[in-house]
C-alpha cells in the first residue's frame, strides 16, 4: 500500500499453495506471504513447479481449481473486511485457521458455536454473536 499499511487478502492452509498465480502469467504481484500459525510447509523451486504445471494435466487441473477457490476466498475476505466489525472478522479468521489446519494437526483452537440469532450478514452489534468454548 502507498503508505506501508497492510491488509490480509488471502488465507492459505494445507489445502493450497503460495505462488500459483505466477504460473498463470508474468504480471508482477504486489503481495507478500507470511506464516501466521505454527506448522510447516513444503518448498519446491518455481522452475520444477512450472514444468509440472506445463506437463501434467492432473497437476494443472488441481492448481487451477485452487486458484479459482482462492479467488472466491479473496472476494469473501474483502467483503468481510468492508462490512463487518473486528469481532466478526476475528471469528472468520479463527474459523478459517481451524479449517485450514485441521488435516495436519489436532485442533488447537477453541470450538466455536454461534448464538441462535447470529447472522453472518449482520454487521451490527447483534445480541447472539459467537461464543468460543
Image (tube, grey):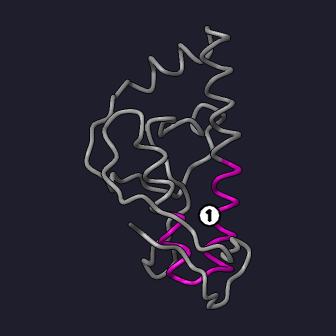
Residue nearer the viewer, 29 or 96: 96
Identified at 68% across, 49% down, the residue is: 71
Quick one: SS at disc 1? helix
Image quadrant assignment for residue 47: top left
Q: Residue lying farthest front? A: 116
**Numbered-mark total:** 1
Residue nearer the viewer, 130 or 100: 130
Q: Is residue 122 left or right of residue 77?
A: right
Q: Residue lying farthest right? A: 121
Relative to 128, say whether 46 is above or below: above
Residue nearer the viewer, 114 or 58: 114
Identified at 56% across, 75% down, the residue is: 88
Relative to 132, say whether 70 is above or below: above
Identified at 47% across, 62% down, the residue is: 112
Report which residue position mark 1 lands on: 77
Most common secondary structure along the magenta stretch: helix
Relative to 105, say whether 87 is above or below: below
Residue 14: x and y in percent read 44, 36
Is 94 covered by the magenta stretch?
A: no
Residue 13: x and y in percent read 45, 43
- What range is drawn magenta here? 71-93
**How dense is the environment of label 1, judged by Cα within 10 Å: few (below 14), some, or many (20 and up)?**
some
Q: Is residue 121 left or right of residue 129?
A: right
Is 88 covered by the magenta stretch?
A: yes
Quarter of the rendering occupied by the C terminus: bottom left
Q: Residue lying farthest bottom? A: 125
Residue 78: x and y in percent read 65, 68
Relative to 66, say whether 47 is above or below: above
Residue nearer the viewer, 59 or 86: 86
Image quadrant assignment for residue 75: bottom right
Identified at 51% across, 35% down, the residue is: 15
Amino acid at each position: 500500500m502507498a503508505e506501508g499499511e497492510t491488509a490480509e487478502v488471502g488465507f492459505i492452509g494445507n489445502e493450497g499453495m503460495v505462488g500459483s498465480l505466477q504460473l498463470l502469467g508474468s504480471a508482477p504481484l504486489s503481495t507478500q506471504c507470511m506464516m501466521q500459525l505454527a506448522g510447516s510447509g513444503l518448498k519446491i523451486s518455481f522452475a520444477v513447479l512450472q514444468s509440472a504445471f506445463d506437463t501434467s494435466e492432473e497437476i494443472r487441473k488441481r492448481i487451477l481449481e485452487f486458484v479459482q477457490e482462492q479467488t472466491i476466498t479473496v472476494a469473501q475476505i474483502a467483503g468481510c473486511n468492508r462490512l463487518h466489525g473486528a469481532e466478526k472478522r476475528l471469528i472468520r479468521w479463527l474459523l478459517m485457521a481451524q479449517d485450514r489446519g485441521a488435516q495436519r494437526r489436532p485442533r488447537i483452537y477453541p470450538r466455536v458455536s454461534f448464538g441462535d440469532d447470529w447472522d453472518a450478514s449482520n454487521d451490527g452489534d447483534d445480541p447472539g454473536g459467537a461464543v468460543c468454548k
